[in-house]
Image (cartoon, rainbow, N blue to C red):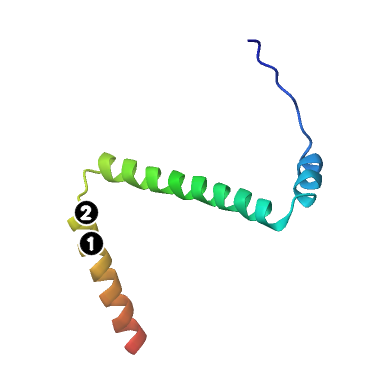
């Protein structure tokens, strides 16, 4: 089967979305957010692998940063 590409103007997308009901809009928003979150998590995992980190090392760094933050907050 042949593939067809169609160029759509952003205004056309906005018009189409504005015609949807609230449930459908929320469904689209949730899908977009899920994809973006998944992308961020994948980048995070790749960085961990590339830098040869472990989750325990990350936990230690986060805990130190948290302690420093609270100490500065008290001062």
Task: Judge whether 50 appears above or below 63 on screen.
Answer: above
Q: What is the crowding at mark 2: few (fewer than 14 residues within 10 Å), some, or many (at least 20)?
A: few
Q: Residue furthest top?
A: 1
* Residue 47 placement: quadrant: top left
State which quarter of the image contains the N terminus: top right
- Kindly identify which residue carries mark 1: 59
Q: Position of residue 46 (x, y in %)?
A: 33, 40
Name the one closer to the observer, 25 or 61: 25
Please say whether residue 33 is visible from this viewpoint. Answer: yes
Say what secondary structure mark 2 lies in: helix
Residue pictured at 70% horizontal, 21% vertical: 5
Residue pictured at 22% horizontal, 54% vertical: 55
Q: Position of residue 73 (x, y in %)?
A: 36, 84
* 72 left or right of 4 in image: left
Q: Which residue lies furthest to the bottom in this view?
A: 75
State which quarter of the image contains the C terminus: bottom left
Q: Position of residue 6 (x, y in %)?
A: 74, 24
Task: Judge whether 61 appears above or below 73 on screen.
Answer: above
Residue pictured at 50% horizontal, 49% vertical: 34
Say what secondary structure mark 1 lies in: helix
Name the one closer to the observer, 30 or 23: 23
* 38 left or right of 58 in image: right
Assess whether mark 1 and mark 2 are in contact (beta carbons under 8 angstroms): yes
Residue pictured at 39% horizontal, 48% vertical: 41
Task: Judge whether 72 appears above or below 66 on screen.
Answer: below
Please say whether residue 75 is visible from this viewpoint. Answer: no
* 70 left or right of 39 in image: left
Q: Mark on residue 55?
A: 2
């Amino acid at each position: 089967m042949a593939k067809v590409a169609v160029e759509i103007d952003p205004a056309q997308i906005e018009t189409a979305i504005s015609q949807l009901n609230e449930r459908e809009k929320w469904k689209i928003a949730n899908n977009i957010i899920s994809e973006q979150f998944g992308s961020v998590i994948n980048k995070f995992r790749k960085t961990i692998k590339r830098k040869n980190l472990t989750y325990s090392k990350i936990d230690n760094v986060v805990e130190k940063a948290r302690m420093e933050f609270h100490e500065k907050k008290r001062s």
